[in-house]
Image: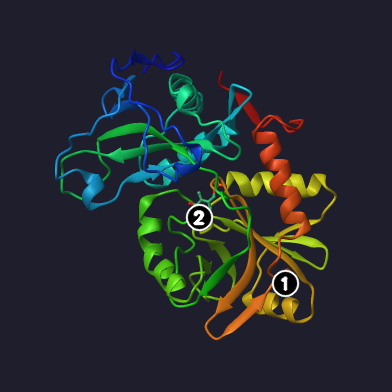
Amino acid sequence: MLMGVSMNIDLKLTENPKSKPGDDSKLGFGSIFTDHMFMMEYDDDIGWHNARIEELHDIQISPAANIFHYGQEVFEGMKAYKSNGEVFLFRPDMNAKRANNSLERLCMPKIKEEDFVKAVKKFVEVEKDWVPKSKGTTLYIRPFVIGIDAQLGVHPSAKYYFIIIASPSGAYYANGMSPVSIWVEDEYVRAIRGGVGFTKTGGNYAASLLGQEKAEEHGCEQTLWLDGVERKYIEEVGSMNIFFKIDGNVVTPMLNGSILPGVTRDSIIKLCKDFGYEVEERKISLDELMQAAESGKLEECFGTGTACVVSPVGKLVNNDKAITINDCKIGQLSQKLYDTLTGIQYNMLEDKFGWRVKVC
Ligand SMILES: *Cc1c(COP(=O)(O)O)cnc(C)c1O
């Protein structure tokens, strides 16, 4: 692609659209896909090229492709929201920036921010009839980049695909919001400073699966990861950042290189400040939390992420110790943050931060 020239997207739309799911309450997550995919290719010689939206299809790549052996992969997760027939995205520029931070760390070619956003917008516009409209439902959007060079030498791939697929998704809280139990993992770690914890790359998830199984064996829904060096400080949950309300203030682990910088995290911090709270981004030890819980100062705990928006935490379990938070009920701040953020996303509340982007 030539510098300064806006990316052109070829549309090769299907003649055989699939029938759309009829019952929004049965959508679930991530198993139904829309009619099309966005795709473009990268070559060291020509850069990103051949952007198109075409019928969703399997891709053929060599068994020697980099992605299968050395894991050059970056992904993003975002949603499109339908409200009164209009379709919106939420802060897509943040996903574009984060994708580039991930790509840079993994020695993969960056994508111009405006091209990333343009690709997502055009793709969602093509698939607008796939965005479900019942309360809480969304079109989940999955952009990703993979190294496809057929070369077993350990070095960055010379060829890549950038692909976007999308999946209509049911409401995260189909049965109402309810606080989850979280397992505090102090054996395995997810990421370490200097590694790739701040990137959205598949390897971080592969590294997290065993801890997640352990959490489930202990009757918990999710894993809370501690820092990779001392296993003493709180980092984040499987696919959510974590917040605490301690003695009236909002506290969340500071971004330290091993924590994923969530778009929801950033939005929640801005909303809390707007509500008049002090927000402390700092190190929080598990000991400090236990003490705050014992002295009755740990008032709320919630995870944040694109999937759940806000997920109240009712219980933290660490081996034979467990702390219950807010009597296992949804906290006032958690509820207010959920209502405000979803209100902005679904065009029901004023968007004073300019986060909503209308697609069509
Ligand atoms: C995606 C992700 C999050 C949440 O990020 P959002 O941009 O808010 O969706 C948090 N932690 C991890 C490990 C993630 O992969």
Q: Nearer the viewer, residue 287 or 56?
A: 56
Which residue type carries mark 2?
Ser
Regarding residue 11, the answer to whether it shows in the image is yes
Is the residue under label 1 in contact with that under label 2 (CB below 8 Å)? no
Say whether residue 104 is left or right of residue 271. left
Name the residue furthest right. 276
In the rendered image, residue 154, in percent from the top left (x then y), is placed at: 22, 51
Which residue lies under the disc numbered 2?
239
From what the image shows, is residue 234 above or below residue 269?
below
Say whether residue 184 is left or right of residue 355. left
Which residue lies under the disc numbered 1?
327
Disc 2 under 8 Å from ligand 1? The reply is yes
Disc 1 under 8 Å from ligand 1? The reply is no
In the rendered image, residue 110, in percent from the top left (x then y), is placed at: 41, 34
What is the secondary structure assignment of the residue under circle 2? loop
Q: Nearer the viewer, residue 76 or 232?
A: 76
Q: Quadrant of residue 243?
A: bottom right
* Image quadrant in which the N terminus is located: top left
From what the image shows, is residue 331 above or below residue 189?
above
Q: Nearer the viewer, residue 69 or 334?
A: 334
From what the image shows, is residue 279 above or below residue 151?
below
Regarding residue 253, the answer to whether it shows in the image is no
Counting the numbered discs, the total is 2
